[in-house]
Structure formats: C-alpha cells, structure tokens
Amino acid sequence: MSFKIKIDINADVGEGMGNEALLIPYLSSCNIACGGHAGNMETMRRVVKLAKNHRVKIGAHPSFPDKENFGRVFMEISNDDLYQSLKSQIKNLLKIVEDEGLELHHIKPHGALYNLAAKDKNTADIIVNVISDFSKKIKLYAPPNSIISKVAKAQNIEVVFEGFADRNYNEDLSLVSRQKNDALITKKEAFLEHVLKMVLERKVKCVNGVEVELNIDTICIHGDTENAHEILLYLHENLMANNIQIK
C-alpha cells in the first residue's frame, strides 16, 4: 500500500501505568520517564527492551524532579539544580539505551517543564544546553512556535513539532489546563476527528470552536490517559484507512 501522508505517533511511557506492552506495538516513537516525575532504572530498562523489540524510536522524558506532583506543577529550583537534575535523568536512560546497542533519538520535557520551556527562555536555554552537552544529533520534541523550539534551532538542534491527540487547545495554542473539565479528549471518535484535522488540514479546532493553523510532525498520546490502549488501536486502524502511515 502506498501512503500519501506519514506521521509519527509518540506516547509518554514508563510512568507507572504498566501498559507499555499494549501501547508500544502501535507507536513509532516513545518518551521514557527517567526518574524525575516517575520511573527508575528497572522501568527504564524494561521499556527500552520493549521499544527495541518493536523498533520504536526511544526518547528521554525528563521532568522537574518532583515525583510527588508527577512533574505537573511548577517547581522553584535553581538553574544549576535543574540543569544537573535533567542531565542526570537523561544520562541514566542513555546508559541503558547504549547497553542495548541503540541510540537516543530525542528528548521531550515532561509536564510543567514542557509548558514552561514553551514560553520561558531561561528554562528553554537550560534544556537546550543539556541536549547540546550530550549530542546535537538528539532531536527535541516541542510545541510549534514555542520559545524552546526557537532556542533549539538557533543551536542547530533538529526540532520535531508536536501536537496532542488527547488534549484540547486554547486559541493561543496552549493546552487547556488539566484543572478544567474539558482539558482531556477521551472519546475515541472525537479523538480521531481531532487527529485527522491536525494531520490532513494542518489545523486544530480549539476549545472555543475556532480553528487555528497547527503544523506538526508528531502526535502524542499520554500513556496515563484512560483507555489509552483502546484509543491508540482505534487511531491506528483509522489512520491507515485514511491513507496515513505511522512512521
């Protein structure tokens, strides 16, 4: 079958849900929690092996060092402490990846860190400096038009622009706060409609009904979303039916 469009599908994994064996066969890349908000050496090793078996690209998913709040709350932390924490988190995953004879494909910040780096240059600089210290061959997964994407490009780091399959957007392309009832998309039909608009039309229908341009290279499904496996399977089947290849 000849596909007209290709899209990367990624998911945040290794976060304690235990559903990686169900998700990874339907992904093309994954973001592995590396101890900041969730995960440890054992979970990292298990998920890396799963990804290797299914030829899924491996990314690091570092966070504010805050397991208590699952990395979803802004954390007061010095620049140096954040830098050292991120470097340590990624280093731990990288060792496991290299032990398996693989390469780290990308880095995607998690939760509050991801959202902050999208708009705060200081935070963006710290994350990009950490990536540069490892290798400029490692890609960054980031929101379109974000501060961190611009900082990374200025440092010759390749940026993979990300959209979210299971999250609603505000008109300024920020994600609707998880504190609000309409933050998450959980019905598979709405999920598919949301994704098809992003992939086929390069647009997103925002929570207020306005459609905004959104050019993305990868789509994320959160591994801790309720019925994530069911939704991912439904999405996988219907993308193929719409001549879209997951790659």
Image: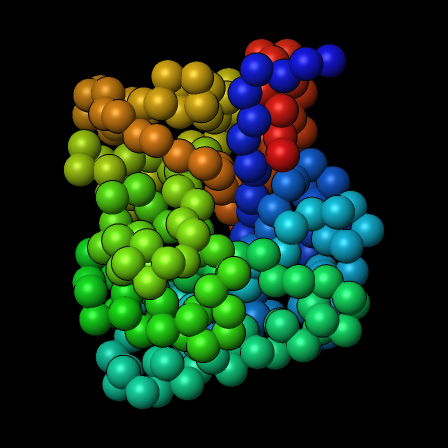
Between residue 13 and residue 30, name the one nearer to us. 30
Q: In this view, does 217 lie above or below 150?
A: above
Task: Point out residue 196 in the picture as x, y percentages from the top left corner.
Answer: 46, 19
Q: How many marks?
A: 0
**To which quarter of the image does residue 71 belong?**
bottom left
Please report the residue visible at 47 percent of the width from the left and 64 percent of the height from the top. Answer: 136
Would you say 186 lies left or right of 207 here? right
Residue placed most toward the observer, 114 or 158: 158
Report the front residue among 11 and 230: 11
Looking at the image, is 218 positioned above or below residue 236?
below
Q: Is residue 244 left or right of residue 95?
A: left
Dividing the image into 4 quarters, which one contains the N terminus? Answer: top right
**Residue farthest along the right direction in this orientation:** 53
The quarter holding residue 209 reads: top left
Look at 78% across and 60% down and name the residue there: 49
Could one spot residue 222 in this view of the protein?
yes
**Residue 86: x percent and y percent?**
44, 76
- Return the x and y of residue 83 as percentages of the image width and height: 37, 81
Tell me where residue 98 appears, x and y as whole percent. Answer: 71, 71
The correct choice, above or below, for 48 with respect to 172 in the image is below
Residue 147 drawn above or below residue 221:
below
Quadrant the C terminus occupies? top right
In the image, what residue occupies the spot 51% across and 69% down? 135
Coloration of the structure image: rainbow
Residue 122: quarter of image: bottom left
Question: Is residue 191 rendered to the left or right of residue 213?
Answer: right
Q: State the residue lying farthest toward the front.
A: 156
